[in-house]
Image: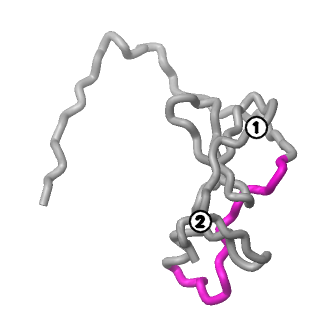
């Protein structure tokens, strides 16, 4: 069994601002953008026999948008056609990034089968 490494964090005093009074909450509304897509985002929908606590934990908190850790302006998602789509936050357009080869689209009941999820 591996043990997590123990490390201590040291404060760099020259980087601290003595006049810092804390963060202030802005009451300005957050911007909300809408974009017309060729195909809707693929969502994982549970069947009637899958409503257990474990299923809710696994699928209920699933985020369908994934940010690019190297470029914060890029977002990726899978659409209902099995394509991995790349969206640049400038909201100019959404382009196909890649496609799942074995994706089977099903009826409105249940999600598209990606990676054999059922």
Q: Residue at x 32, y 10 (%)?
A: 14
Depth check, front residue: 36 or 2: 36
Numbered badge on residue 54: none
Q: Give above or below for 30 relative to 112.
A: above
Residue 29, image quadrant:
top right
Residue matched to label 1: 30
Mark 1 and mark 2: Cα distance apart in space: 33 Å
Q: Is residue 74 magenta?
A: no
Depth check, front residue: 59 or 82: 82
Q: Is residue 1 left or right of residue 83?
A: left
Residue 6 image position (x, y, % from top left): 16, 42
Q: Residue at x 64, y 30 (%)?
A: 73
Numbered badge on residue 114: 2
The magenta stretch is: 37-53
Q: Give above or below for 93 relative to 111.
A: above
Residue 95 image position (x, y, % from top left): 73, 38
């Amino acid at each position: 069994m591996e043990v997590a490494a123990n490390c201590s964090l040291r404060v760099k005093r020259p980087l601290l601002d003595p006049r810092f009074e804390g963060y202030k909450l802005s009451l300005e509304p957050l911007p909300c953008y809408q974009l017309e897509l060729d195909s809707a985002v693929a969502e994982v929908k549970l069947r009637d026999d899958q409503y257990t606590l474990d299923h809710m934990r696994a699928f209920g908190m699933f985020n369908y948008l994934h940010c690019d850790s190297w470029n914060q302006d890029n977002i990726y998602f899978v659409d209902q056609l099995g394509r991995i789509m790349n969206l640049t936050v400038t909201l100019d357009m959404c382009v196909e990034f890649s496609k799942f080869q074995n994706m089977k689209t099903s009826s409105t009941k249940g999600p598209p089968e990606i990676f054999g999820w059922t």
